[in-house]
Amino acid sequence: MFEHLIQHARETREHAYAPYSGFAVGAALLTKSGRIFCGCNVENLSFGLTICAERNAVAAAIAAGEREFTAIAVVADSKTPVTPCGACRQVLAEFGENLDICSVNLAGERFVSKLSVLLPRAREGILGT
Ligand code: THU
């Protein structure tokens, strides 16, 4: 089901700029309209300015005028499949909490989840909601 998306994430991972951690990540986001937007992590000497693959994929999609997403694939060379960090979960939740998340490592192991499970109550209490 996620094959095409995973392949995009895997290819984009090759472009990761991760000289400080050595940990390359690729992400591919599927829009409701069927388009795919990709991102890789872009690190910075300051560390704090590093941007994750997932957030870069969101930025690419938003810049192209897309705001409705159905799934995201994340690929990394990790022992167990990597799920989006807390910051990325919150950014993804901005555009809908029903997102399917498919995490894959290079060994081919998969972990499939939902954003609403990884980040429950994402909007609660913010700006008085
Ligand atoms: N990273 C991502 O790009 N996505 C994740 O889901 C996990 C972490 C990046 C941030 C940093 O460049 C490196 O991986 C190590 O944390």
Image: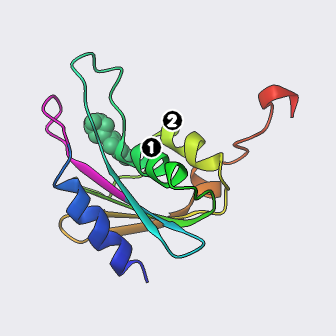
Range shown magenta: 17-27
Q: Residues within 10 Å of mark 2 (few under 14, many from 20)?
A: few
Q: Is residue 40 magenta?
A: no
Lateral position of residue 104 relative to residue 127, left or right: left
* Residue occupied by mark 1: 55
Do the residues under discs 1 and 2 have CB atoms within 8 angstroms?
yes
* Secondary structure beneath label 2: helix
Say if residue 20 shows up in the picture. Answer: yes
Tell me which corner region of the image, top left, top right, bottom left or bottom right, holds residue 126: top right
Quadrant that contains the C terminus? top right
Tell me which corner region of the image, top left, top right, bottom left or bottom right, holds residue 41: top left
**Colour theme:** rainbow
* Point 32% across, 70% down: residue: 6
Image coordinates of residue 62 in percent, x first then y, are 54, 50
Q: Main secondary structure of the magenta part?
A: loop
* Residue occupied by mark 2: 87
Image coordinates of residue 82 in percent, x first then y, are 35, 53
66 up-or-down from 4: above or below: above
